[in-house]
Amino acid sequence: MQRRPYRHGETPADARERRRAFARELKTRVPLDRRLDRATASALSRLDETVERRLASGDHDLLLDETRIASWPRQAARLATEVDGEIMATGAAAGADPVEVARAISTTLTARFGFAPHASPTERVLVLLQAVASAHGRLAAHGWERDVLWTGTGVLARLFDTASDGASIDLTRHSGRIHLELRHGDERPGAVGTAYAVLARAGRLVIVDDARGHLVGLGEPVLTALTGVVAALDAVETFREQATD
């Protein structure tokens, strides 16, 4: 099943689609600080499950809508408040430090989403994510969309041609650069005949191997829009890498 980005209030069709759409956020977990006192650690023992249950409820689907990125921090803050209230209302919270509980919730949500609850909409990572969404919109005008339900190992993003039967592009990152592979039908990654390109340091998309002319055949407008998507994703990934150094 393929699914383009959620836009203008669109939401997942069912619980299964919602789990796939939130796959990265559901998989990301942060170990608790070992310096927490026993009561606080006990209160936070179900933190991950509480966050995941709230995301699966459908009450926070706004965090999937790529036309509402400026509202994501506010929605994440609402999620943090709900999780905090649920945790502190349990019997396990007796004696827990409420400040440390709130800090742990903020830390785990920041790790899952890449920005902190209550972050400014002008925070760098959110501006970069908005640039990615805008670039995807320009590419979508040419019939290519990002599959937001794709969770393949090692693939940064998968794009698909909405007008063809099975044409797809995988974007991966190696040695600090984004690499692109275009395939048709059931061709396997690396198969003879697939087309390759790489984002050069100058921000240009350089075709490395296109023996069958699949990439060139996309046409200049599509290649220009595709370059914009790759460059925007590269900026996000570079920022994230630098933030963890």
Image: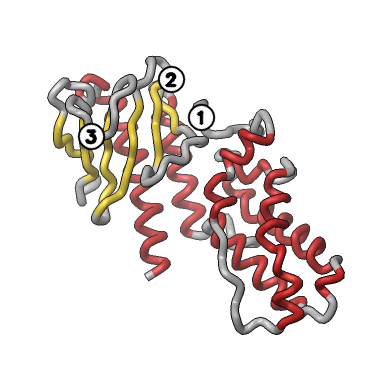
The answer to whether residue 97 shows anywhere in this view is yes
Which residue is drawn at the image coordinates 28% and 46% (left, top)? 178
2 or 3: mark nearer the eye:
3
Quadrant in the picture for residue 195:
top left
| Marks 2 and 1 close (CB-CB < 8 Å) | yes
Which residue sits at x=37%, y=65%?
Answer: 242
Is 53 on the left or on the right of 171, as rendered? right
Identify the residue at horizontal 71%, vertical 69% (top origin): 44
Residue that carries the numbered disc 1 in the rendered image:
4
Nearer mark to the viewer, of 1 and 3? 3
Residue 123: percent from left, percent from top: 52, 60
Q: Nearer the viewer, residue 76 or 71?
A: 76
Residue ID for mark 2: 162
Is 127 on the left-hand or right-hand side of 31? Answer: left
- Crowding near pointer 1: few (<14 within 10 Å), some, many (20+)? some
| Residue type at numbered disc 1 | Arg
Q: Position of residue 112 (x, y in %)?
A: 56, 57
- Cα distance in 3D space between marks 2 and 3: 23 Å
* Mark 2 / mark 3, whichever is N-terminal: 2
Q: Amino acid type of disc 3?
A: Gly
Judging by the rendered image, the residue that carries numbered circle 3 is 190
**Comes first in the chain, label 2 or label 1:** 1
Secondary structure of the residue carrying numbered label 2: loop
The answer to whether residue 122 is visible is no
Amino acid of disc 2: Thr
Circle 1 sits in a helix, a strand or a loop, which is it? loop
Give residue 161's position: percent from left, percent from top.
Answer: 39, 22
Residue drawn at x 69%, y 56% as measured from the top left: 49
Q: Nearer the viewer, residue 106 or 235?
A: 106
- Pointer 1 or 3: first along the chain: 1
State the image coordinates of residue 201 (x, y, percent, origin top left). 21, 51
| Frontmost residue, 187 versus 97 | 187
